[in-house]
Amino acid sequence: MTKELKRRTFSDLFKLEVLSEYYSEGVSQLSITRKYGLTNGALLSWIKKWPVDSKVLSLPSEIISSYQMAHPKKEISPEEALHKRISDLEKSLEYERLRNLAYKKLIEIAEAEEGISILKKDGVKQ
């Protein structure tokens, strides 16, 4: 027996009320998610959509400044950004190598099963 999970949807008004409480009371994300029965991912996506200085929330400037002081944005240096870019490119390259290997194996299996050559030979005129 598998249990079907229903995807809950929340109104924007509810989301903004939860975020107002989170920003103004200075409580943890965990306590907010437990209080309202939310997933951490849902709360994080709402925070990303409506940051503390969002005009929609219309929070007082004292709350905005106190939240920003408590949660400073991490500044990354250009060198760190380049290292991250290199790491991302290396992961992407490894993924493409594995993908290429999978395609070659697929062609090899198909050629063996069908008994025909799938890849074109060098020197064949078209």
Image (cartoon, rainbow, N blue to C red):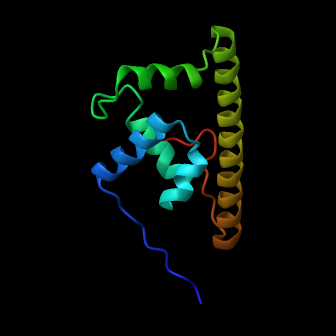
Which quadrant holds residue 106?
A: bottom right
Which quadrant holds residue 105?
A: bottom right
Quadrant where the N terminus sits is bottom right
x and y, in percent, of residue 6 in the image: 43, 73
Total residue callouts? 0
x and y, in percent, of residue 44 in the image: 50, 43
Examine the rendered structure and indicate whether residue 2 appears above or below residue 68. below
| Residue drawn 46% across the image and 19% down it | 65
Whether residue 14 can be seen here: yes
x and y, in percent, of residue 79 in the image: 68, 10
| Residue drawn 29% across the image and 30% down it | 58
Camera-side residue: 19 or 95?
A: 19
Name the outermost residue toward the bottom: 1
Whether residue 38 can be seen here: no
| Residue drawn 43% across the image and 42% down it | 21
In this image, 69 relative to 18: left or right? Answer: right
Camera-side residue: 20 or 87?
A: 20
x and y, in percent, of residue 120 in the image: 59, 48
Camera-side residue: 99 or 123?
A: 99
Examine the rendered structure and indicate whether residue 83 appears above or below residue 77. below
Examine the rendered structure and indicate whether residue 74 appears above or below residue 113. above
Camera-side residue: 76 or 98?
A: 76
In this image, 66 relative to 83: left or right? Answer: left
| Residue drawn 67% across the image and 46% down it | 100
